[in-house]
Amino acid sequence: MNSDPKNITTSSSEDISLVQAFCNGEKEAFDRLVLKYKDKVFNLCYRFSGNREDADDCAQEAFIKVYRSLTRFRQESSFSTWLYTITSNTCKNKLASIRYKEGKIAIRLDKPVSTEEGSVTREIKGHFPDPKRELERKEKGAIIQEAIDTLPQDQKTVVVLRDIEGLSYEEIAEVTGHAIGTVKSKLSRARDVLRMRLKGLI
Amino acid sequence: MKCSDIKKMLAEYIDGTLTESNKALVEAHVASCKMCAEEVAFLKTYIKEAGSLEKMKAPADFLEKVHERLERRFSFEKLMRTLFVPIRIKVPLELAGVMATLLLAFFVGRIVISGIGEGPPAMLAERPEKAAPWNVTQAKQMAKQAYQHSARGTESMAEYKAASSAAAPGADMYGGYVDYDMSPEGGMSGASSACYYPAEPDYEVPEESIADLPEFIKSLNGKVTSQIYDENTGLLKELIVEVPSGKQYALLGKLKAFDYIISSTENVDAEDEGNRALKIVFK
């Protein structure tokens, strides 16, 4: 989420204009909203699901729901918060399905990572301005993603929204429907779990 | 402060949203607590790494896929709407369908139930209203129905007994109601219990034959001890007769085309030389 207040205001105004245009019959306004938020939504779905295929499915489904309910959007929150709410719920429902559970595979954090150069062990590397850094960053990202994948759904949601997407506690409370205190509590528990899982790995 | 209290504030400490006093408390504790210091170090590293994770991008054809999914979804819904018409028409149609089904089930159920219930008891119970001894056609029809039910012979006696015992006392049934046992063959057995004596189906009933009964009884060497006529119609309503023992069967044979009730208070088990006193009430 962009933290510059001015940009947020501009972005919100643009979103409202597009929503109103859609309600007036301009279907192209929906396309513009999709193009503006598709990467954010896709990234969120990826962090929830852990793979691109499920992320693609969840993201498309989220926008279908947006399309069907856009005329009922009452602007009680910002469009982006509303969109995040829909995306979060869509991912939660889809990933809770039996099919997803059957396909879920437990991953060991000390499992070697296969790269183009062969298998490497997961180790903390120093920051060096060389091509390996990108590889290391991706590996570290994979380790963190795998650790996040082991969290319960409610903890995973707040971790993704707060630590990865950078939403405020108030926005997370709005998206999840929890009180702010509950959000902080879940986040604290999730980080405790991640600390145990990522100890020595990042 | 305790580690548990510090831990609750660590998230906001990392976020930079703690008050100055709380921030000072945390830093003072962390400076002297190795465990909390490790916790803070982890959180700083983790949040930095998590916030720097690669932003995954949607596929280039994402918008097209969304349109395709929309098209598929709405095509299905449009088909459903076309098949099942608008709600304002669908609901009344469905209600009409439900009502029609219920009505059909009701009428079919009535037919089935009335078919199951049909049988000697119901038919016999209806006979008194239908029976008109002076209506030859009706009498023949009812006699035929009764005969069909009685066609099994003695098997039907139990039914007739059950029917007669279920009937109101004194209720007449077509062909007769006797309060002593009689077999269809004419034999008598014991004591007072109701008996149905079916009429023969094609027996012609001359309208004046009831009036001929006294003569017939006399021909059996019996006698009529009492005759009562209906005040309104002038027709014979009741006969009290005495017939020689053994001759009652012939009398019963003569009576079988009529609607009547016959009773006797005597024990007719034993064959004796005396007469049988019978009371015949015509309906």
Image (spheres, grey):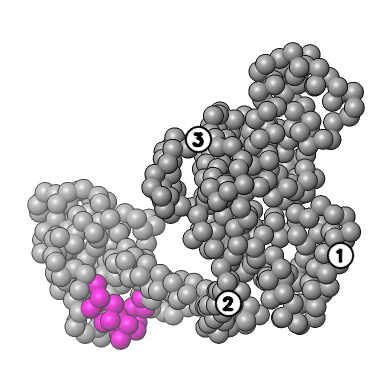
Q: Quick check: can you spot residue B282?
A: no
Residue B100 in the image, given as x and y percentages of width and height: 50, 78
In this view, the mark in front (1 or 3):
3
Q: Are marks 2 and 3 on the same chain?
A: no
| Mark 3 neighbour class, 10 Å CA radius: few under 14, some 14 to 19, many 20 or more | some
Q: Helix, strand or loop at disc 1?
A: helix
Taking the spot 29% from the left edge, 67% from the top edge, the residue there is B119
Q: For the residue marked with disc 1, what is the amino acid?
A: Thr
Looking at the rendering, the stretch of residues picked out in magenta corresponds to B131-147
Q: Are marks 1 and 2 on the same chain?
A: no
Of the image marks 1 and 3, the number of the one nearer the N terminus: 1
Taking the spot 82% from the left edge, 35% from the top edge, the residue there is B16
Q: Mark 3 lies on which chain?
A: A
| Mark 2 neighbour class, 10 Å CA radius: few under 14, some 14 to 19, many 20 or more | few
According to the picture, the residue beneath numbered tag 3 turns out to be A123
According to the picture, the residue beneath numbered tag 2 turns out to be B64
How far apart are the two marked residues, 1 and 3, measured between alpha carbons?
43 Å
Q: Helix, strand or loop at disc 3?
A: loop
Q: Which chain carries label 2?
A: B
Indicate left or right for A168 with B219 as reference: right
Q: Give A114 or B64, whichever is nearer the viewer.
A: A114
Residue B28 in the image, given as x and y percentages of width and height: 81, 17
Taking the spot 38% from the left edge, 55% from the top edge, the residue there is B169
According to the picture, the residue beneath numbered tag 1 turns out to be A10
How far apart are the two marked residues, 1 and 2, measured between alpha carbons?
27 Å
Q: Quadrant of residue A121?
A: top left
Query: Please, is residue A128 above or below residue B225 in the view?
Result: above
Q: Quick check: can you spot residue A25?
A: yes
- Residue A23: give its label: none
Query: Please, is residue B125 above or below residue B103 in the view?
Result: above
Indicate left or right for B262 with B113 as reference: left
